[in-house]
Amino acid sequence: MNAPATEDSFHKLIHENYMYGLWEIASQMTPHPRPEAVPWQWKWSLLERVVKESCTAVPVGDERRAMQLFNPGLNGQWATTGTLIAAVQVLLPGEVARAHRHSPAAIRFIMQGNGAYTAVEGEKVIMREGDLVLTPSWQWHDHGNESGDIVVWMDGLDVPLTKALNAIFFEMNAEIRPRATKPVNGSKSLYGHGHLAPTWTRERPKFSPLMLYSWDQTMQALHALRDRDGSPYEGISLEYTHALSGGPVLPTIGCRVQLIRAGEKLKARRVAGSSVFCVRQGRGRSVIEGKAFEWSRNDIVAVPSWALLEHANTGSEDAILFSINDRPVFEALGLYREEALA
Ligand code: GTQ
Ligand code: FE2
């Protein structure tokens, strides 16, 4: 018989054999989320310089010229928040980024320039400033720029989430630019009519079949609703909807646009789930976990899960924020919560 185990010898035994007592790790069961990601802002003054220098410093090869925004709290991981990556991508006139597909889903929000395109599964989707373009999971896509503008957009992908699930798949296309099989902006001409959808096509229910959410339609909706009270936390906040289901545009990524009127100061709240916003227009201040960020056009800000967040318009004109979030995942799994400041 062995001698009776001591506390120390017992711990040694279990640690040597890849076990831990719950009493040793129980502090990880936190009363609320404590993300490693920190609130962070990338100012356009910096991004603009990076964009400009990238044009001569790095080519578009097989990989896109996309500068990935790494959250300083996440130790060099490919992540802007715990679940999302945002990036700033640049395409010069005449350039093409090779076709590929991946299991992470992507969105593009066009920050500057008009007339580049993303071809999604054979449909050229033309990008204009303020547009939202979808690249759902496992859809072939290449980018091209046949315009005279340098076109800059924010990419948003669910890479950290997909990675956490060990569900990353990626494939390069044999062709740089697979031939177009569908009309230009065809999904918009079919599905882009708001409350009316065709009855003879009922494909792809997991993600919205509408690939292009045009800025003029977004602005029309914001302006039609600008005299409402809106949300005390988000202002006139609208969700981009799946053209058939009315739900989020992608199963893992939700997209929103919010109008914060001149002089408006919104209330503070925490929500379960992280987000990244890109300033479309105007000036304001967001206080995130006690840290104040002054923002203006094309700034990008990371908001970790459960961070206390409060927005204010500090300018004399409308402020408009575009944002991506992981809320659809939280909703689908029954994990969504919110808490207003008492
Ligand atoms: O443009 O397809 O920022 O595949 C990261 C991965 C952009 C893209 C990114 C991508 C893309
Ligand atoms: Fe991609």
Image (cartoon, rainbow, N blue to C red):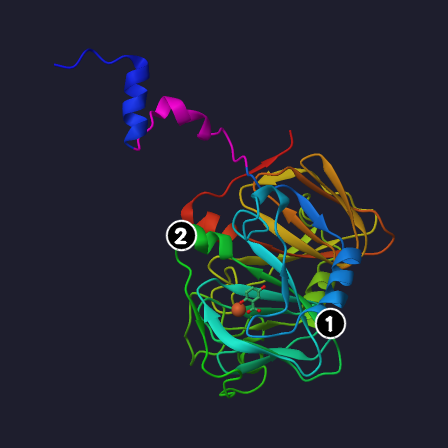
The residue located at (58%, 85%) in the rendering is: 184
Residue at image position (73%, 43%) is 266
Q: Amino acid at mark 2?
A: Leu
Q: Residue 115 at what x, y percent from top left?
A: 69, 80
Report the front residue among 272 and 299. 299
**Residue for point 47% across, 47% down:** 330
> Where's residue 30, x and y in %?
48, 29
Closer to the N terminus: mark 2 or mark 1? Answer: 1
The quadrant holding residue 169 is: bottom left
Secondary structure beneath label 2: loop
Residue 299 falls in image quadrant: bottom right
Q: Is residue 267 above or below residue 161?
A: above
> Which residues lie in the magenta part?
18-34
Q: Position of residue 133 (x, y in %)?
A: 59, 70
Front-lying residue, 277 or 312: 277
Residue that numbered label 1 is attached to: 56
Q: Which mark is residue 165?
A: 2
| Percent x, y of residue 163 | 44, 54
**What amino acid type is highlighted by mark number 1?**
Thr
Residue 305 covered by magenta stretch:
no
Alpha-carbon distance for marks 2 and 1?
37 Å
Q: Quadrant of the N terminus?
A: top left
Name the one closer to the observer, 258 or 52: 52
Q: SS at mark 1? A: helix
Compared with 290, 295 (above or below) is: below
